[in-house]
Image: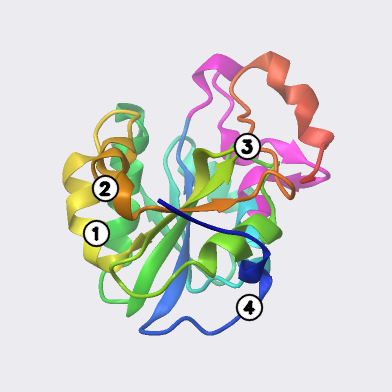
Amino acid sequence: MTSTTDRAEADETAPGGRVAGLVLAAGGGRRLGGRPKALLEHHGRLLVEHALDTLRTGGCGPLHVVLGASAPLVRERADLAGCVVTENPRWAEGMGSSLRAGLTSLAGTGAGAALVVLVDQPGIGGRAVARVRAAYRSPASLAAAAYGGERGHPVLFGASHWAGIADGAVGDRGARDYLKRHADVVELVECGDVAEPYDIDTEADLARLERGPV
């Protein structure tokens, strides 16, 4: 594994294709009493809006978002202007189905890679996204944010990996198994100084919503 740091702060045009931004925002918030995570508020904005802004700030485009639970309500309440919205009717099967739907939506866009963020990680901001985005070299690239050397989100998937990732994306594992099998080529980008990778999963986590990235 290799490691990059602040050299990734620059917003440069990626060679060989754009780096698209993909937000996975389909979860139903089962442990939050059935409140869709996309509609939780963070500093006066919905989490799905925060995630999209994080990708914009980090230099990604085009932007795609996958909705699932309460998708019509999310469309009604959230500002999704300028984004391609995909609805995943199988969202209850887990994050893997949303990742598959999102990667499918990127087919034909000309993007050389997809940078994926999760809607329930508001402690990750544009600085972390920019660092991981700058790890893009070609459609064969694989990169992920690291926190104290441990792999986390966001994650960058070069386009040549999309089919393999989609094939193994089941349940809530997403791309975890694929990344483990390709650990020797995953570039880890340390982001512990600019982001906090906590999840908003339970009622106890809601207190973190007023916190921002490091």
Q: Judge depth for marks 2 and 3 and give the one in front.
A: 2
Q: Which residue is at a point 42% across and 84% down the rendered structure image? A: 15
Query: Where residue 153 appears, x then y in whole percent?
Result: 52, 44
**Between 5 and 9, the one nearer to me in the picture:** 5
Q: Judge depth for marks 2 and 1 and give the one in front.
A: 2
Q: Residues within 10 Å of mark 1 (few under 14, many from 20)?
A: some
Secondary structure beneath label 1: helix
Across the whole image, how many numbered discs are drawn on residues? 4
Query: Where residue 35 appears, x then y in whole percent?
Result: 59, 26
Secondary structure beneath label 3: loop
User: Along the polypeptide, which appears first: circle 2 or circle 3?
Assistant: 2
Residue type at numbered disc 4? Asp
User: Along the polypeptide, which appears first: circle 3 or circle 1?
Assistant: 1
User: Along the polypeptide, which appears first: circle 4 or circle 2?
Assistant: 4
Residue type at numbered disc 2? His
Over which residues does the magenta segment extend? 28-50
Disc 2 from disc 1: Cα separation: 10 Å
Q: Which residue is at a point 79% across and 23% down the rendered structure image? A: 207
Q: Residues within 10 Å of mark 4 (few under 14, many from 20)?
A: some
Disc 4 from disc 2: Cα separation: 27 Å
- Residue that badge 4 annotates: 11
- Residue that badge 3 annotates: 197
**Between 86 and 207, the one nearer to me in the picture:** 207
